[in-house]
Amino acid sequence: MNLHPKKLFPETDNIELLSHQMVTKRDLLNFGNLLLSEIKNSSKEDKPTQWLKSTEVRKLLKISPGTLQNLRVNGTLSFKRIGGIIYYKYEDIEKMLEK
């Protein structure tokens, strides 16, 4: 969430003046409304959980177990092995797809 002072106080031209002013009820109301809208917007993004198991990755990418193994072996897709289960970070999958 990026709460820039210009977003919080759009009527203020000189941001330096904010350090010498008191916070009013209107300012708090603006902040509360902005915070609520940011929370609503961030909850609309339906990202999967951060760590995915192999079966979830295969379903997501629509690939076979062998293809997933090749992605691991050649270093295209990083992973973590915990016990006998291999986990993949969702962010790493997104980065791989962007390349």
Image: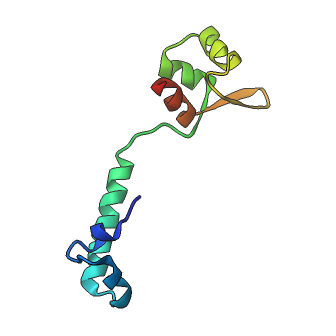
Identified at 33% across, 90% down, the residue is 22
In the rendered image, residue 15, in percent from the top left (x then y), is placed at: 32, 77
Residue 71 locus on image (x, y percent): 63, 17
- Residue 71 lies left or right of residue 25; in this view the side is right
Which quadrant is the N terminus positioned in? bottom left
Where in the figure is residue 46, as x and y percent of width and height?
40, 40
Colour approach in the figure: rainbow
**39 over 50 or under it: above or below:** below
Residue 5, quarter of picture: bottom left
Which quadrant of the view contains residue 19?
A: bottom left
Q: In the drawing, does residue 3 fall left or right of residue 78?
A: left
Give me the residue at 62% from left, 24% from top: 77
Whether 20 is drawn above or below 86: the answer is below
| Residue located farthest toward the left when viewing the structure as drawn | 11
Q: Residue furthest right?
A: 83
In the picture shown, does residue 17 fall above or below 71? below
Q: How many numbered marks does the figure carry?
A: 0
Residue in the image at 28% along x and 80% along y: 27
Instruction: Judge by depth and name the residue closer to the eye, 6 or 16.
Output: 16
Left or right of 50 in this view: 13: left
In-front residue for pair 46/71? 71
Residue 78 visible somewhere in the drawing: yes
Q: Position of residue 9 (x, y in %)?
A: 26, 74
Q: Residue 4's image quarter? A: bottom left
The answer to whether any part of residue 32 appears in the image is no
